[in-house]
Image: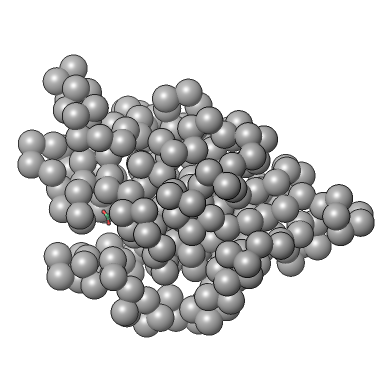
Amino acid sequence: MKNNTKPTVEVCFSPSLYAPHHKPADIVVVVDVLRATSAICTAFEHGVERMIPVATIEEARDYKNKGFIVAAERKGSVVEGFDFGNSPFAYMNQNLQGQTVVLTTTNGTKAIETVRSAETVVIGSLLNLDFLSDWLAKQNKNVLLLASGWQDKFCLEDTICAGAITENLTSTGKFRSEEDSSVAARYLYLSAKDNYFGYLKASSHRRRLRDLNLNEDVKYCLTPNTTNVIPVLDGKYLVNLKQ
Ligand code: MLT
């Protein structure tokens, strides 16, 4: 295949930069390694049937008042009055098997909201890195990797994961990658890949979670390839992609 006819794989550093990257037919992969998209992958791995991602606490509260199971996180902590937050370990719970869980988080669910108009939206993390990359490689479509960032700013861990997916796809020889953001994400991934935990020592959200005694969550979220789920947006729901 000639290089310029190959599908692209590109990286967007933050939801605030999404508009110029938006192409409706792209597959958009939302990445929030610490911790929203890792928690979502874990939920499906452990038997949650559907999730409803919502951007605001108000929407989450409306669902709660209607009797839904609702998880809410802001700035790393569980929001008062909700069932649990964004720790992946909270989703390893038999009582959630077969259930619908509503989720709102500081950045991850807001990023999902930003890309709702894309034709296909899937959820990426280090946990489903290779399985998701293999699936993306088979679709023969442009892929946009959206790092959820922190409050609309750049963040290291999401960019590294986006760089890992970029590396996986370009190394198949079936994709081209031309944006500087994608080149930078790939370089960051190559520098970090042998020790994500050590590399991310200085990252702002790793520090924030450490101060909340959540280092175990960080270690879990930085362990690649522990699940073969691909959460996909289907209307207002996230479901596990059936293949
Ligand atoms: C987010 O959506 O901003 C994060 O997942 C924050 C967190 O709970 O670590």
Side of 182 relative to 50 (left or right): right
* In front of the other: 89 or 169: 169
Determine the residue positioned at 43% across, 76% down: 196
Position of residue 50 relative to residue 28, above or below, is above
Determine the residue positioned at 53% across, 30% down: 117
Side of 12 relative to 54 (left or right): right
- Camera sees residue 209: yes
Side of 139 relative to 184 (left or right): right
Q: Position of residue 212 (x, y in %)?
A: 14, 65
Determine the residue positioned at 49% across, 68% down: 160
Q: Position of residue 228 (x, y in %)?
A: 53, 49
- Residue furthest left as drawn: 80
**In the picture, which quadrant includes the C terminus?**
top right
* In front of the other: 137 or 105: 105
Position of residue 175 relative to residue 29, above or below, is below
Quarter of the figure with residue 141: top right
